[in-house]
Amino acid sequence: MTAPAVRHDTEGLYEVLAALDRPCYIVDRAGRVGAAHRPPAPGSGAELLAAAGPLPPGRLGSADFRRDHGVRYAHMAGAMAGGIASVELVAALARAGHLAAFGSAGLPEERVETALARLAAELGPAGAPFGCNLIHNPLAPATERACVDACLRHGVRCLEASAFVQLTPDLVRYRVAGLRRDAAGGVRAEHRVVAKVSHARIAELFLRPAPREIVEELRAAGRVTAEQAELARAVPMADDITAEADSGGHTDRRPLAVLLPALLALRDRLAREHPHPHGTPVRIGAAGGLGTPHALAAAFALGAAYVVTGSVNQATTEAGTSAGVKRLLARADATDCAMAPAADMFEQGAQVQVLTRGTLFAGHAARLRRLHERYDSLEALPAEERRRLQESVLRRPLEEVVDECRGYLKAHHPDELPRAERDAKFRMALVFRWYLAMASRWATSGRSERSGDWQIWCGPAMGAFNAWTAGSALAAPEERHAAAVSRHLLRGAAFHARVGQLRLSGVRFPAGCAEYRLPPAAAAVPAAREDVTGQAAAGCP
């Protein structure tokens, strides 16, 4: 057997480390660190310092996640509301072996219906999996019901459940209606639920079986069968629970390093107390702040079964938002984010994390919050505040906005129209919510005359992603294809996981060989150039 080719130069070390489908052996020869794909032969004068096995990106995370969802990677693109997680984004990632959920929240029923029909037609014959977001809407439960109905009609096999503070009949109906008994007598869940949570109390709802009272009501109404109702006793409400840390949009800004271990410990404690006779334990994934390979590798090291990206998906070419928004996102720094009042549950003080660079939305929204706290009606506003509100924020007479709000209530929520007429404080909140809701629509549609008011959901991960991709093939917005972004994030995460493993053995690498390299801008490779194994055909080390 010939001696292995040991590489001591920086480029050679990097090439050995980056060959993720081959083992890596770190050796010392005469005080110089080297790397090879085979161990040193006895008597060669080289001392083995550390070794790491193959770690292609398809081995990161949970094999059960990949198998159950029918994907190649333990990665999910979370559903950004308003169709930002678009049909094109979901389809591109599904074909590349990733799980992605359509951003149905805030869309009219007909748009959700059309989108799911397109995804089913485009991906169904190929067997590529996809999901749909189901957002909890306690003020309009009919929208939740319509979304579940559409998912059932179009054979959607996965729901990403977000913002739930309690389990609702329609979410339970989706889960239980997909339960079947398999040939071995176990339970097969054809409808998978991925729950996005940031509190242990909410996670516990999904770690336990569906509430018996809700299941019995569904059975009595003929929405689920008696056998499904019985099987529901042995199956937790979710297959996967995403620990949502500091992220864009709605967020409690929880630190991932605290939240993820807490949910893992809760999962394990409940599994010991109430073991389920069928199926695998509920998997815990990670979301929030994941915009670089280092961040993904850290999440997997913390014990995440899968990772979920969000803000960076919004900056891809397939995302359902305007080119202007993508250009602003491409210039964002990690500090260019702030919390602002949310359109939904404005009166309850809900907030979203948004981009501050290039838009005045965060400041305008904060002013609306202060006005709502300080005054009881639009009529009570001082003249100067009223002028600034109409000229600088709404850019329309207050009376016109009030009339538009009345028209919206009449068409969509007629039961609330009497309250709007008699309650001046509620009427003021409607006007402010109009601005907050329209600001996100102006952004996604690219309304240039309202660019100063664009509401762009964004977390610190976006700035970290920009810093990582600077000067590379992924720097320009037009080159940020969803599949390419996800591919490089996962390959980089595998690379850094391997480097981290070797460093734990005490290896010190020379500068320049232990950082994952993106192809330079001139070597940009279209996302479509990917072989059947999911590895890059070109442009990836």
Image (cartoon, grey):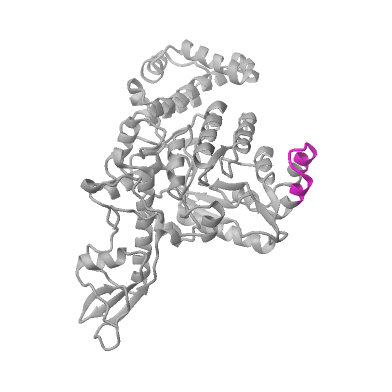
Is residue 209 found left or right of 356 in the rendered image?
right
At a point 52% along the width and 12% down the height, the residue shown is 403
Would you place residue 333 above or below residue 301 in this image?
Answer: above
Residue located farthest toward the bottom when viewing the structure as drawn: 43
Image coordinates of residue 288 in percent, x first then y, are 44, 48
Q: Which residues are magenta?
A: 216-230
Image coordinates of residue 246 in percent, x first then y, are 44, 46
Quadrant where the C terminus is found in the figure: bottom left
Quadrant where the N terminus is found in the figure: bottom left
Q: Could one spot residue 336 in this view of the protein?
A: yes
Residue located farthest toward the front when viewing the structure as drawn: 125
Q: Nearer the viewer, residue 147 or 282?
A: 147
Image coordinates of residue 40 in percent, x first then y, are 29, 81
Overall secondary structure of the magenta stretch? helix
Is residue 327 found left or right of 408 in the rendered image?
left
Q: In the rendered image, which quarter is residue 167 located in?
A: top right
Q: Could one spot residue 108 in this view of the protein?
A: no
Q: In the rendered image, which quarter is residue 511 located in?
A: bottom left
At a point 60% along the width and 48% down the height, the residue shown is 192
At a point 30% along the width and 66% down the height, the residue shown is 17
Image coordinates of residue 295 in percent, x first then y, are 38, 54
Would you place residue 385 above or below residue 278 in this image?
Answer: above
Q: Nearer the viewer, residue 161 or 526?
A: 526
